[in-house]
Amino acid sequence: MYVCLCNALKCRDVKAAAAAGARDVPGVFKACGAKPKCGRCFEETARFLPNEAEDRVTA
Ligand code: FES
């Protein structure tokens, strides 16, 4: 399933970026070699990222 239509990024691309260390939406775009354009996908992209608040509690 596509998450970002502007850059043709699929959910597997976003998951791979998160697994490789991306911790925010700009980090995902950078890891994928893409640049944000319309911004419609930002909320959906963030859903694939680890919950930072949860990380702080478990760290
Ligand atoms: S859909 Fe992702 S930047 Fe437009």
Image: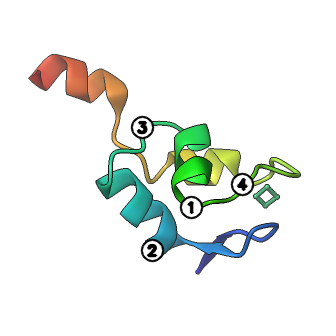
Q: Picture coordinates of residue 29 (x, y %)? A: 62, 51
Determine the quadrant in which ligand 1 lies. bottom right
Q: Which residue is mark 1?
A: 32
Q: Are marks 3 and 2 in contact (CB under 8 Å)?
A: no
Q: Earlier in the sequence, mark 3 or mark 1?
A: 3
Q: Residue 18, percent across and down?
A: 38, 52
Identify residue for label 2: 12
Q: Quadrant of residue 15?
A: bottom left
Q: Nearer the viewer, mark 3 or mark 4?
A: 3
Please name the residue that numbered disc 3 is placed on: 23
Tell me the distance, in whole angstroms, between the alpha carbons under discs 3 and 1.
Answer: 13 Å
Badge 3: how crowded within 10 Å, few (<14), some, or many (20+)?
some
Could you tell me which quadrant the N terminus lies in? Answer: bottom right
Residue 3 in percent (x, y) is at 64, 67
* Dot 2 amino acid type: Arg
> Badge 4 is on which residue?
41
Which quarter of the rendering shows the C terminus? top left
| Residue positioned 75% across, 52% down in the render | 35
Q: Earlier in the sequence, mark 3 or mark 2?
A: 2
Identity, as a three-letter code, of the amino acid under mark 3: Arg
Kindly state the secondary structure of the residue where label 2 is placed.
helix
Examine the rendered structure and indicate whether residue 25 appears above or below residue 44.
above
SS for dot 4: loop
Q: Earlier in the sequence, mark 3 or mark 4?
A: 3
Horizontally, residue 32 falls left or right of residue 21, namely right
Taking the image as shown, residue 10 lies to the left or right of residue 16, namely right
Picture residue at 42% right of the left edge, 44% below the top: 22
